[in-house]
Amino acid sequence: MGTFRYAAPQLGILGNLAALVVLACVIGAGTGTNIAEAQELFVTNRSGNSVTVYPRTAFGSFGPIRTISGVSTGLNGPFGVVQDVVHGELFVANNFGVSVTVYPLGANGNVAPLRTIIGLPFGPIQLAVDLVHDELFVVGAASVRVYSRTASGNAVPLRILLGPFTQLAQASGIALDLIHDEMVIVNASNNAITTFPRTADGNATPLRIIQGVNTGLTFATGVALDLVNDEIFAASQSSSAITVYPRAATGNVLPRRIIQGNNTGLNLPAGMSLDLVDDELVVANTVGGFGIGSVTVYPRGASGNTFPLRTLFGQPTGLNVPEAVTLTAIPPLSAAVLPLSRSHQIGTFLTAFATIINSASFPAQQCFVALPANAPLGLGTFVFQTTDPMTNVVTGTPNTPANIAGGGALQTFVFGFTPTAVIPETSLAMNFLCDNTLPAPFVAGVSDLTIVTAATAIPDTIALITTLSSDGVVRIASASDTQVFAVATSNVGAAGTIVVTADTGGIVLPVTLTVCETNGVGACLAPPAPSVTVSYAAGTARSFGFFAAANGSIVFDPGVNRVFVRLTESGTLRGATSAAICTKPNAGC
């Protein structure tokens, strides 16, 4: 693992991340994704041996849009369910089948699992996936077993939390707190909530225990964490109640609030899921709705004998003793990477910066940056850390996610790895994630990082684009005018002969792009041309002026219509940057 101590000086040409923030804002404003279409609710049905999937806002007797069911699925008394949105997988704990089965996230029908974990000494009840550390947590009986996320067959656990000191007793629910590096376990038979370090192993003692008559816990079966408002939610089956505590509470404490009563529709509740994007709590009730169970939804801050916002119930739903729920709630995230290209000698720490912006009204929880699922081998250990957006200085601790407030708030990160192998020019479509969300939309030239590694030192030209409007958009006055933009570069690698060009990234646009090298005051050193070739010494900086001459209308669509500046050596990318482009009077331009 590398260190971020020298990350900011290494990329000192960037100054601060204002340009990166603008870039992400422009992309967020320019994308038109229908968020509601992609939001889905997954429910495990213990007696139905099925997983049913609904639109997030489904209510009444709405039928599932997909159902995983049949002898080929391996489902047998499914209890826990959790999704991995990075790798597109759904994990299910089969209590009766004593197994964990994994399916494609969009699976439907009588499908065979992608892989199955067997050899468990107990029937698993609940699961959690840690996408930062690539681990799967399996809870049941009096233990927590931790596997590699990709484990299959009779796999050997990485860790086993088990023993009398743990005070685990019929562990029935788990939630991971990657911000505080903890895991929270609810225990049914001793009515307790136990909190451990995330990496706890063996006969470890809990960090904290919520337990006692004041807590209101009665056969606790489900748990959810709200790390934005610093709360723990627990489901008590025996009393059909949801109790809420301060996250760091310990001992025989009174709940901060309780959802309970005839109006609530709670009936032997089991698993829960928090949707901080829509500010809701979703609960699976094992009884109710003609005896087959129900799913009830409440405001996150609900208390007392409150009516649910909506209830999913009835024979057409396919519900049959629902045990757990997980949902995809998609905040309008936008994200960007800077710089867009790095060329590195293997064995040296490669870094880049990233920004995630949350345009939702409500906060996003446990947000982080991650490599794509198809990242090549030889990248070494990936590490990320939060930064101050105005100074690039690292904050927090490595590999610790962050909460992001709503209303356009942002969080910046630095990330890196030490390549261990020669890798040809490869584009990494980076993942930008928050708890229970799909990744931020991919935008070529904005949220990807192109890397090249070599056995010896090679040129590595960091490039930063500046437009006249200072917002990452090249705005041309009309369909027949010319607009200029500038690119500052710095070679933080070895010396080389660099060719500088601009293009529209494979999208045919009515624009002609030319370039010239500029002096310290922005004047061209030679007439603009389709390309400029420079002998670029190590540790030096150069600047270039670009001319975008329109010969037709270009609509404002920053996720598609862009200009790309590329610095290459013998055809291999050594640096890149991009900006949106449009012509007036198109809307948004």
Image: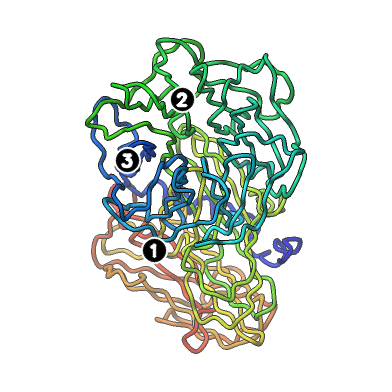
| Residue 46 horizontal/vertical position (percent) | 39, 37
Three-letter amino acid code at the position of disc 2 = Pro
Vertically, is 486 above or below 288? below
Label 2 element class: strand
The numbered dot on residue 560 is none
Find residue 64 and report its horizontal and vertical position in percent: 26, 38
Q: How is the image coloured?
A: rainbow
For residue 88, which quarter of the picture? Answer: bottom left
Q: In this view, does 32 lie above or below 529?
A: above
The 10 Å Cα crowd at callout 1, few under 14, some 14 to 19, many 20 or more, is some
Q: Are marks 1 and 3 in contact (CB under 8 Å)?
A: no
Residue at mark 3: 52
Mark 2 and mark 3 lie on one chain; the one further toward the N terminus is 3
* Label 2 – label 3 distance at C-alpha: 18 Å
User: Left of 505 or right of it: where is 143?
Assistant: right
Q: Residues within 10 Å of mark 3 (few under 14, many from 20)?
A: many
Q: Residue at x 59, y 29 (%)?
A: 188
- From mark 1 to mark 3, how far is it between C-alphas? 54 Å
Foreground: 228 or 133? 133
Position of the N terminus, as image quadrant, is bottom right
- Secondary structure beneath dot 3 equals strand
* Three-letter code, disc 1: Gln
The residue identified by callout 1 is 483
Q: Sequence-wise, which precedes: disc 1 or disc 3?
A: 3
Q: Is residue 139 rendered to the left or right of residue 84? A: right
- Which is closer to the viewer, label 1 or label 3? 3
Q: What residue type is labelled 3?
A: Thr
Which residue is disc 2 drawn over? Answer: 269
Query: Toward the viewer: 127 or 384?
Result: 127
